[in-house]
Amino acid sequence: LSGEQIAPGETLSLKATVLPENTTFGGITWKSSNRKVATVSDDGVVTALTEGTANITATTADSGASALCKVTVKESSVTVMLPFNDVFENQWFYPHVHYVYANKIMNGKTETIFAPDEAITRGQFIAILGRYAQVKDSSMENPCDNVKFEDVDANDYYASHIAWAHEKGIVEGISEKEFAPAKKITREQMATMMFRYAKAMGTEETLPSVDG
């Protein structure tokens, strides 16, 4: 593993290779030396949180052999201009909208309208979490082939995110066959999904204990 640099909010997928290839190593454990700067999930996905450095270590379960990757988190020097005519610099949420747009986590309703006062749906919210984890949108050219819910079309942009989140245990349907992607999401649903997302992405050590 070598050194890497990413910006806050970005993610990076690391891969540890054990040689020779026929070696039995019993799995790999990932660990971050500075979880305030960057966290790492069980499958090696690093999430940058704030500027600084963190050593990401991959250790084999059987022999204890390890490799280290130094991750530097630094703000990008590239300036991205907001194209929306309904978001202004004097509004409290401007920097947050700029962040999610610049990092390709959220789009506008159109090329020039963000609609900051509108509620979002279950499908939209899961797409936000999925993009933050670098899950790609599905489409007609790249359909999702493992959607479990009958009301989610494989070509819908959020289909891949719903399939990913369901597999990770982040979200459930309103029934075994229905996800209700167009239904407005409630605050309690968002809180539950965000908590499960944090656990799935390897940040459970920083979370409080809750029942349920």
Image (cartoon, rainbow, N blue to C red):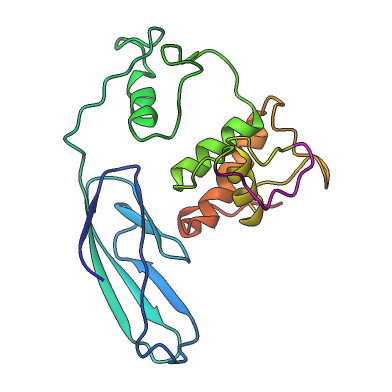
Q: Can you say whether 120 is above or below 9 in the image? A: above
Query: Which residue is at 45% across, 88% downward?
Result: 25
Q: Can you say whether 187 is above or below 199 in the image? A: above
Seen from the viewer's position, the closer of residues 136 and 84 is 136
Magenta stretch prevailing secondary structure: loop
Asked whether 208 falls inside the magenta stretch, the response is no
Left or right: 110, with 209 as reference point: left
Query: Which residue is at 58% across, 33% downward?
Result: 125
Seen from the viewer's position, the closer of residues 208 and 75 is 75
Q: Can you say whether 73 is above or below 3 in the image? A: above
Seen from the viewer's position, the closer of residues 31 and 76 is 76
Query: Which residue is at 34% across, 57% downward?
Result: 35
Query: Which residue is at 82% across, 44% downward?
Result: 177
State how many labels appear: 0
Image location (x, y in percent) of residue 208:
54, 52
Asked whether 144 falls inside the magenta stretch, the response is yes
Q: As drawn, which residue projects farthest toward the front?
A: 141
Seen from the viewer's position, the closer of residues 210 and 22 is 22
Q: As drawn, which residue projects farthest toward the left?
A: 77
Span shown in magenta: 142-151
Image location (x, y in percent) of residue 68:
26, 73
Image location (x, y in percent) of residue 48:
32, 49
| Quadrant that contains the N terminus | bottom left
Image location (x, y in percent) of residue 111:
42, 16
Left or right: 208, with 107 as reference point: right
